[in-house]
Image (cartoon, rainbow, N blue to C red):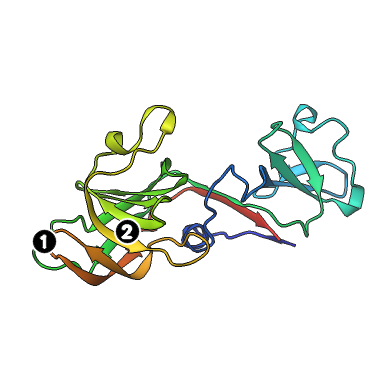
Amino acid sequence: MLLFLHTYKQCIEYILFSFLVSVSGTACNDKFIAPFRRMPNESWVYQNDNMMMIPDSLWFPGQPDGGDFQKCSTYTTIDGKYYDTSCLYKSCFICSWSYQPLFTLRGLCAESQIDTQFVLRPELEFDKNIFFYGVGKNSIIFDQEKHSWLIVEDKVHELIGPENASIRPKNVLGTYIDNFDSHHTPVGMMNWNLTDKCNNVLPLKLTHVSYKNIKFTFFKMY
């Protein structure tokens, strides 16, 4: 069964609450669900508009070969080719958008100078995780070494080095320890240990607030 989420709100929520740590690592096994489906006339079309077909050159040699038993498709980062597969196959989804989702951070003390607005920037990542970029001077990142979400004052160029290498932050203003086995996002109500002027453990709530003027593509199969 194919499930398509047709609103931007659903798309962002699925990213945040079903977030996969790495888009190309072992969590996805280098294979992603593709948006193409086999039609009765044996052509392959793009699910969202039933118009685009996969050129023969993009199929792995010998593919597609599953007939009516494999009406859905996958894409692998190993060879850059498409494969047909059963529509019951489970794997990573792809979600993309043209504009940056806006989040607000509430619950800071009156003396705090930590940013209260952040945007999710899909072109940035830290330790292969999503990057919340502060509208002012802070960012929220996930540090795999500490297994914690951090509010940092380091600038982007101080956090991301050559070839997108992650550089340990030097100015940490807040820490939320992820005690779960898989990486949860900091969205929602979380207890943050703040070392700025608040200097206390406070329940902060990071909330997605903007859905306007968003263009996106989302698909997931399971």
- Judge by depth and name the residue closer to the eye, 37 or 106: 106
Of the residues shown, which amino acid type is indicated by label 1?
Lys
Of the residues shown, which amino acid type is indicated by label 2?
Phe
Q: Quadrant of residue 80?
A: top right
Coordinates of residue 205 in the picture (x, y in percent): 30, 69
Q: Rounded to the nearest whole Å, what is the CA distance between mark 2 and mark 1?
A: 22 Å
Dot 1 alpha-carbon crowd within 10 angstroms: few under 14, some 14 to 19, many 20 or more: some
User: Which is nearer the N-term, disc 2 or disc 1?
Assistant: 2
The disc at residue 157 is: none
The N terminus is located in which quarter? bottom right
Under tag 1, what secondary structure? loop
Query: Which residue position is annotated with label 1?
Result: 197
Where 43 falls versus 161 (above or below)? below
Q: Residue at x 71, y 31 (%)?
A: 79
Can residue 181 be seen here? The reply is yes
Disc number lying in front (2 or 1):
1
The C terminus is located in which quarter? bottom right
Q: Residue at x 24, y 44 (%)?
A: 170
Dot 2 alpha-carbon crowd within 10 angstroms: few under 14, some 14 to 19, many 20 or more: many
Coordinates of residue 166 in the picture (x, y in percent): 39, 38
- Judge by depth and name the residue closer to the eye, 207 or 155: 155
Coordinates of residue 38 in the picture (x, y in percent): 81, 47
Q: Residue at x 66, y 42 (%)?
A: 30
Query: Which residue position is annotated with label 2?
Result: 103
